[in-house]
Image (tube, rainbow, N blue to C red):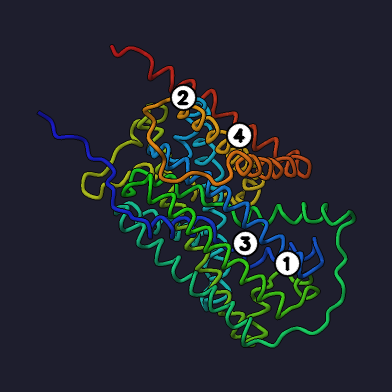
Amino acid sequence: MSAPAPKLVRLLGGRDAALIVMGGIIGSGIFMNPSVVARFVGSGFLVMAVWVAGGVIALLGAGIFAELAARRPQDGGLYAYLRDAFHPALAFIFGWTLLLVSQSGGMAAAAVTFANYLATLATWHASNAGVAVVAIGTFTAINALGVRTGTTTQNAFMVLKILAIAAFAAIGLFVAHAAGPSMPVHVPPGGTLAVIGLAMVPVLFAYSGWQTSSFMTAELHQPQKTLPRGLIAGVVLVVALYLAVNATCLRVLGIGGLAATNTPASQVAGIAFGPIGLQIMAVVIALSTLGFLSNQILTSPRVYFQMATDGTFFKQLAWVNPRTHAPVLAILLQGLIAIVIALSGSYDQILNYVTCNDYIFFGLAAIALIVFRNRDARDPMAPKPFFRMPGHPVTTLLFLVAAWYVVGDTVLKSPHDTGIGIAILLSGLPVYALFARRRAAPAK
């Protein structure tokens, strides 16, 4: 009698879930995006209002995913929600897009951003692409050692980010001198609602990323409880940190100074500490991007693993190392594609391609919750979920509108890039058909 095949093991708890949620959201964007928002709205009050509104929408998204996890704690997270609510083909093209562009392109961009900031600090001259490859390779190897090793590494970076952002906010709010009166900001034409709508897009992008935590369902203790708790706690803490960063930038730079710079966090650090402050902020941003890279390499291979387990992708990716209980081949594939994109130098363009794709799937997640609620209402045997989305269906539909507003905005602003992104997404359909046909074929 053969021994059972090794499986993923449940080694992660609620604290891990919350830190993974935060690690999937916080990259380098929060250190630059406050300026983008300031240029749109031209008012300190509206800057804070837009970031609060974005935080509310992020909490709505976290609530939707929390109830999805409570109702359907299947392995694979969002991939499984799409598979069970709609069709395996839709779930496949979600994973296909993650692998080819969105997650891999995000990893490549994070690795190259880290290399760029490291170059400003180091005394040696090294290829930025080479440093990026080493960073991706290092985290690929760490995660191949097991989920506990990968998660501990991700958590360590996330704790450092929390401490760094908290210290930045404290220095800016209580130590640095406040800015005096500043020149008015010339905002885009249109009414208040129009400019707020424009500003919401970069804010919503800065808040996105909580969904990657759902990929870890197979390795969480009681995922129907720990993941909902982690989602809500993680997003609440991110909202608090983001508001603190924006309040700091407004106090030290003023609305005019904030709108006039592309590197607000670095400028605040420079005002507080002089030239050494610029170096300190470069270290903080480098660590933040490195932590984001660690998070993405930890989470996304679990989707490809589940695709292979379902029989709709290469079966080798479902292999689990019997010693580390990690999906090593799925992790290696993810790292390899991220390296190829980093070396190609096309990561920025790739991210433009898939800007709207992520929000298409966010909207579909909201619809999936409606589908599951209706199904469970007709099933007397359906278990009562640990968490229910407050205010459903109004709040769920509000999030759906916000998500697809971003889709519409990107289609109008970048129809060419959006078209390429949707074409990449749809290219997964014939690939899915090939794997589905192979799975359905009788064994000879």
Asked if residue 200 is positioned above or below residue 4 in the image, the reply reads below
Secondary structure at badge 3 equals helix
* Residue 430 position within the rendered picture, expressed as x and y whole percent measured from the top left: 53, 23
Is 444 positioned to the left or the right of 183 in the image? left
**Mark before the other along the chain sequence, 4 or 3:** 3
Find out whether the residues at labels 1 and 3 contact each other: C-beta distance under 8 Å: no
Find out whether the residues at labels 4 and 3 contact each other: C-beta distance under 8 Å: no
The C terminus appears in which quarter of the rendering? top left
Asked if residue 171 is positioned above or below residue 382 in the image, the reply reads below
**Mark before the other along the chain sequence, 4 or 2:** 2
Mark-to-mark CA distance, 4 and 3: 25 Å
| Kind of residue sitting beneath label 1 | Ser
Mark-to-mark CA distance, 1 and 3: 11 Å
Q: Nearer the viewer, mark 4 or mark 2?
A: 2
Secondary structure at badge 4 equals helix
Q: Which residue is mark 3?
A: 29
Task: Give the crowd class for mark 4: few <14, some 14-19, many >=20 residues within 10 Å.
Answer: some
| Kind of residue sitting beneath label 4 | Ile
Residue 137 visible in rendering: yes
* Residue 171 position within the rendered picture, expressed as x and y whole percent measured from the top left: 59, 83
| Kind of residue sitting beneath label 2 | Arg
Mark-to-mark CA distance, 2 and 1: 49 Å
Q: Which residue is mark 4?
A: 424
The numbered disc on residue 35 is 1
